Each structure stands twice: as C-alpha cells, then as structure tokens.
Amino acid sequence: MYLYNSATRKKELFVPNHPDIVKMYTCGPTVYHYAHIGNLRSYIMEDVLEKYLRYVGYNVKRVMNITDVGHLTSDADEGEDKMLKGARREHKTVLEIAKYYTDAFFDDCAKLNIKTPDVVEPATNCIDEYIKIISKLMDTGYAYFAGGNVYFDTSKLDRYYIFNDFKEDDLNVGVREGVEEDTNKRNKNDFVLWFTKSKFEDQALKWDSPWGVGYPGWHIECSGISMKHLGDDLDIHCGGIDNAFPHHTNEIAQSESYLGHKWCNWWMHVLHLNTTSGKMSKSSGEFLTVSLLEQKGYDPLAYRFFCLQSHYRKSLVFSWENLDNAQGAYNKLIARIAALKPEDGPVDESVVAALKEKFCAALDNDLNTSLGVTALYDVLKAKANDATKLAAIGSFDQVLSLRLLEKAAAKREELKKQTVAAGEFTIISESGESDAEIEAQIRARQDAKKAKNFAEADRIRDALKAAGVELTDIPHGAKWKRV
Ligand code: AMP
Ligand code: ZN
C-alpha cells in the first residue's frame, strides 16, 4: 500500500516497523462541544484507513485520546481553556461537560459506522506519563521553567518545522493578532508542557507535580498517551490538517527529544471540510452536527458516502445540495443492491477475487476511496450471478462501512411485505430510479394480461424493449431495467 506521508511530502510504500502489528494513533476530540461534521470527516477517513489495513491482513492497534484538559482556544497556548469555556456556557462542571460530549461524540461515530479505536484514553488519566516525559526534558535541557510554567525550548532542535518549510521570520506566527503574547517564552514557538501559573484562576482540574500544582499542556497529551499504549515508536499518526502545526510539530519535538530517536514514520492529515462561505465553525453560522443532518431527514451514512466520494487530501465543500445528491445516490445504490437475489448463486470466488483487485488497487493508492466507490459500481455491472455480486459488495463494505447489505436486505423485506400484504402488483426499478411513463406501461400490460389480452400484453413488452427497457416478471409484480 502507498500512503502519502506529510512529513516527507511523498507517497511512500507502507511498511510497518514490526511485522506483527501496525501501531496507529489518532488525535481525538476536545470534548467541550459537539463534533461538527468537519471533525467527523477526519474520523471517517481515519476509520477507513484502519479498516483497510485490517482488510489487507494487518493486525492494527489503534489508540485515541480524549482531550479533556489543557486545550486553549488558540492552539498555540493562548486564549481561553476550551473545557472551561464549555462549562461556563452550560453552567456545568468541566467533568460533566467532558462526560456529556464524550458520549455525544461516540454516538455520532456509531451513526457514521466509525469503529471505536482499541484504546480510548482521556488526557486526565495519564498525568504520571506527562510528568515522566517533562522531568526528563528538564533534566536534558530541552525544557525550562519560566514565570511558573514549564516550556519546551524549540531553539534546542536542529529542525523544528517538519510539515512546512517556514522561514525563521515566520516563527512569529505563534502569536496571533488580538492574542496577548506570553513573555515567558524564550522563543516564539516554545510551547507549554506544564502550566502552574495559569491565567485561569478557576481552572477546575489540577494535579501536583515537581513544578507545582497545575495541569498539562495540550501537546504533551498525545505523546504521553501514545507512548503509554504503543511504546517508543509509532507507524501512523493521524489528524486533521490544522493539527500539523503547531500540535503535531510540537508532538514530534518533545517525543523525539525525550526518546533520543525517531518516533513516528507516517503522518496522515485529512484536509478540511468547509462550508460554501469558508471555515466550518461551532460558534458562528449553522452548527453542522450529525443530529442536525438527522433532523433534516438525512441518513448519517449518506454523509459518510459523501466523504468517501472525495479524496482525503483534497478539501471538500459541504452544501445541502451536495448532501442531497449524496443521499439520492446512496438510496439508488441500496435499491440496486436490493434488486439482487441472494439465492442466485453459487458465489464464484474467482470473480470476487478479480473484483477485489480493482478495489484494492484504488485503496492501495493513498486510500483513493472515490475510486473504491467506482469499483463498487463496477460490481453491479459485472458479468456474474447475484450471489457473487453480493459477496463482493459485502467484502468492500468491510472497509467502506455503508451498511449496504443490511440496508438492501431491509429494503427487500419491506418490498416483500408490501406485496404480500396488499396482494398488489409491485413494480421494482433495478437501478432505483422511478419513471412514471414506464410504470404506466407496465401496469397497462398487467391489465391486459388480466383481461387475457395476451397480444396487447406482448405488444407493450415489445414496445418497452424497443425503447431500451427490459422487463422480468416476479411474483406479484415486475422488475425493469434499462439495457
Ligand atoms: P478538535 O476536537 O478541535 O481537537 O478536532 C478534532 C479533529 O477534527 C482534529 O483532528 C482536527 O484536525 C479535525 N478538524 C477540525 N476541523 C476540521 C474540518 N473543518 N474538517 C476536517 N477535520 C477537521
Ligand atoms: Zn494530538
């Protein structure tokens, strides 16, 4: 498999460090509010990566943090504490907020059929890990104490910027307009490892440490949690593109200084989902959540389908119109799969293997899910019996996770029940499209058959055929498709 590595800016052949396991780490949510569907784009694509690695036979151990402390509104240690802000907004405690939004996050993930990582660790669980790392960084001179906080000294590194080639002048980007500069920092991009002197006197969660009572910075969380569960090395680290700087850059700085060797081989960054007016936000404009999609009548899996139709390394624009199109295409896809007959077998394994090859070629090429979806449509067009097609679709859906077989089976049942209950004549379009003109012709043919006017019935069938529509009689109805 070739996977783009943001650290080398190249697609590289993926080879894990250890033959028996792929160690994968994902930056988790900051649980001060609901996730927006942009955040969830990142989690969907990371889910596809994990599932595809398993699909091709790797044993994966995936770890994710839950940020419940230390993340300020600016990623560069300035602004307000996000958790405190959430608690104040809702007149609750920080712990109540963390519990409520962690549960909400996993509910959203379940609706999007995102698997829960093997290990999910709240940042507040691992204080000892952070203290261990920070103590060594202090001992080895990579960290310093100033104004009550412990900072990482970025000037000690030969190469700080990993993901972008900043010029030294750009060091100033750490200080944003309207945000107070932290005068304790020796260098602009030094970052806080441990806060004791906080401007948030009402900081709810504090722990004892060698540097005084306080709490960890945001970046140290991911290094500490990853090392606790995955040890001294990592195969793939994922996150949204905004995490690349400063968060991942700082993770690398502190982890490699602590370990004394390379830490993580692959960095996978998912580009953003934007609205037609720009950046997605939780505080201004429409707050786009999974619940909002449901309230408006969309299936969350139609949103997953929408994400899969584009490549994770391209930014994606969300609009209701785009989602309508995805929902329509998803419904049609389910209808086409529902028209396949599971009893039309046996499964031809060699055909399934050939279809899988195309699917894997797409995903092996830096997780090209849109071509993976094309491979799915190719199954429907393949020269194979229905059971074989269903087997291939079920196989691909282990990765795509669109619940295709389950939804198609439900649709089949629904159609069967309607037919049997009403004793009615059911017309099924194999492609999922509806066409009033064609349906009227099929009913006219049925009426002719009932009246024993077989010549008229045959004439209608022939006329439809001439118009490129093929009919198949089924119990209590007829199926049609364009040929
Ligand atoms: P947060 O809860 O803010 O820490 O973000 C959770 C994840 O969502 C991180 O991996 C972010 O990089 C990612 N993310 C944030 N905004 C977007 C967006 N608009 N599109 C895709 N991913 C995003
Ligand atoms: Zn992280």
Image (cartoon, rainbow, N blue to C red):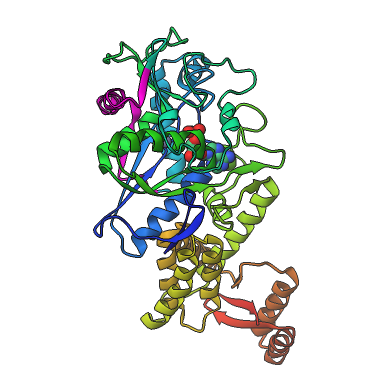
* Left or right placement of residue 184 versus residue 274 in this view: left
The vertical placement of 164 against 398, above or below, is above
Across and down, in percent, residue 2 comes to 45, 62
Q: Quadrant of the N terminus?
A: bottom left
* Left or right placement of residue 348 versus residue 136 in this view: right
Observer-nearest residue: 61 or 295?
61
Q: Quadrant of the C terminus?
A: bottom right
Residue drawn 59% across and 29% down? Answer: 173
The vertical placement of 87 against 353, above or below, is above
Magenta stretch contains residue 130: yes
Q: Quadrant of residue 399?
A: bottom left
Across and down, in percent, residue 125 comes to 29, 27
Residue drawn 29% across and 39% down? Answer: 260
* Left or right placement of residue 227 versus residue 399 in this view: left
Q: Is residue 343 visible?
A: no
Magenta stretch contains residue 417: no
Q: Quadrant of residue 31?
A: top left
Q: Which residues are magenta?
A: 115-144
Across and down, in percent, residue 72 comes to 49, 22
Observer-nearest residue: 49 or 237?
237
Across and down, in percent, residue 141 comes to 32, 25
Q: Is residue 213 visible?
A: yes
Residue drawn 37% across and 34% down? Answer: 222
- Of all residues, the one furthest to the top in this rendering is 201
Observer-nearest residue: 133 or 480?
133
Quarter for ligand 2? top left
* Left or right placement of residue 230 versus residue 102 in this view: left
The vertical placement of 146 against 441, above or below, is above
The vertical placement of 82 against 349, above or below, is above
